[in-house]
Amino acid sequence: MFSKKGKLIVFSAPSGSGKTTLVRHLLAQDIPFGFSVSATSRLPRGAEQDGVDYYFLSEVEFREKIAQNAFLEYEEVYSGTFYGTLRSEVERLWAAGKHVLFDIDVVGGLNIKKQFPKECLALFVQPPSIEELEKRLRGRETDSEEIIQQRLAKATEELAYASQFDRVIVNDDLETAQQEVRKAIEQFLES
Ligand code: ADP
Ligand code: 5GP
């Protein structure tokens, strides 16, 4: 299925922990990384753009892609809201000679690790506390109260998966977390 192989770097964590922030920082650096744009059936948030942040699909379109086996993995992350990694994204980035960065939920992240045990580094981004996570979700000013409550309720469940990842990065001080991520990835790429 895949012609050329770079590495796969998975970032998983409860929503609001800082995955997007850490991934954006890496994309601005000198290592050839590309971002796997996921598909989702949720609506765009804030300034999100189709094809850049996500491929925004209707639920019907999403189900069609499931039927076509277009996903490497997909999840109904929240009830009625689907997210998935398109096989075509990994192919596109590997063909361009890039290592692929994923910002996906914990189950999806472990699923990719299972499919590519050697090529994949799975990082779990842990918020310093649930209180701080709530603060960050509110500070982002992109979600309704109902969505924030839904995400917080799921966070405790997701934190229990941390030990199954290759590395846990506590995102308290941002700069420290960025350095830790960079070091972990450099070690992995050199190994
Ligand atoms: P995720 O992608 O995991 O949902 P984001 O990267 O969107 O999380 O981060 C959630 C919010 O927290 C954003 O407003 C972001 O600027 C902020 N944030 C991220 N990392 C830190 C940090 N170390 N300290 C304080 N705020 C942070
Ligand atoms: P958000 O709506 O905040 O962008 O994302 C909600 C959750 O869905 C986050 O935990 C995010 O990592 C996850 N997610 C995003 N894309 C994918 C994907 O392709 N697959 C899976 N399994 N989860 C995803």
Image: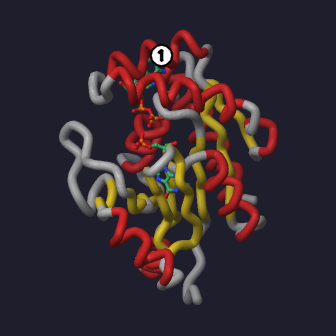
Task: Answer left or right for 111 relative to 50.
Answer: right
| Type of the residue with mark 1 | Glu
**SS at mark 1 in the image:** helix
Task: Report the residue at 50% width, 46% height from top.
Answer: 79
Near mark 1 (Cα within 10 A), the count class, few <14, some 14-19 or many ≥20, is: some
Vertical comparison of 158 with 7: above or below:
above
How far from the left and from the top, in percent, is residue 35? 42, 58
Q: Quadrant of the N terminus?
A: bottom right
Task: Answer left or right for 148 relative to 11.
Answer: left
Task: Report the residue at 46% width, 56% height from top.
Answer: 82
Pick the residue in front: 112 or 179: 112
Task: Report the residue at 39% width, 62% height from top.
Answer: 39
Vertical comparison of 79 with 56: above or below:
above
Q: Quadrant of the C terminus?
A: bottom right
Task: Answer left or right for 161 relative to 3.
Answer: right
Q: Which residue is mark 1?
A: 134
